[in-house]
Amino acid sequence: MPLRKEDMSLKQRKKTLNYLMFLKEKHDGTIKARGCADGRSQREYMTKSDTSSPIVSLETMMMSFAINVKENRHIVVNDIPGAFLHADM
């Protein structure tokens, strides 16, 4: 559950991540914003394996593709841009 800053201990506040926001003005005058959490402060109390996103190796992916082709499977890939922004947290 989200916590208010006032309800957090000093130790909890020190473990929070900063959010970096980058603004860019496009040629047509509109503003584009990109943001990400700054995880550098986590290195003091968490291991790299605990904070990194798991990724598949290229060899594993290619092997899976080869098996799918051999077994005549139909594969569908779908990407929902910004889905994490709309998820309940």
Image: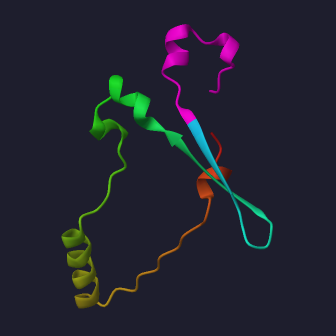
Most extreme residue toward the right is: 29
**Can residue 45 be spotted in the picture?**
no
- Residue sitting nearer the eye, 42 or 30: 30
Instruction: Tell me if residue 3 comes above or below residue 20 in the rendering.
Output: above
Instruction: Tell me if residue 12 comes above or below residue 43 in the rendering.
Output: above
Query: Residue at horizontal 26%, vertical 72%?
Result: 61
Instruction: Indicate the colouring scheme.
Output: rainbow
Q: In which quarter of the image is residue 24?
A: bottom right
Quarter of the figure that contains the C terminus: top right
Query: Residue at horizontal 35%, vertical 45%?
Result: 52
Total tally of numbered discs in the picture: 0
Instruction: Tell me if residue 77 comes above or below residue 18 in the rendering.
Output: below
Most extreme residue toward the top is: 9
Q: In which quarter of the image is residue 71?
A: bottom left
* Residue 48 relative to residue 18: left or right: left
Please state the horizontal and vertical placement of residue 16, each as a whole percent of the image: 53, 25
Magenta region: 1-18
* Residue 64 relative to residue 14: left or right: left
Specify whether residue 24 is painted magenta.
Answer: no
Specify whether residue 7 is painted magenta.
Answer: yes
Query: Residue at horizontal 36%, vertical 39%?
Result: 51
Please state the horizontal and vertical placement of residue 10, each as a whole percent of the image: 54, 9
Please state the horizontal and vertical placement of residue 69, each as a whole percent of the image: 27, 89
Quarter of the figure that contains the N terminus: top right
Query: Residue at horizontal 32%, vertical 36%?
Result: 50
- Residue sitting nearer the eye, 40 or 28: 28
Instruction: Tell me if residue 60 comes above or below residue 8 in the rendering.
Output: below
**Can residue 25 be spotted in the picture?**
yes
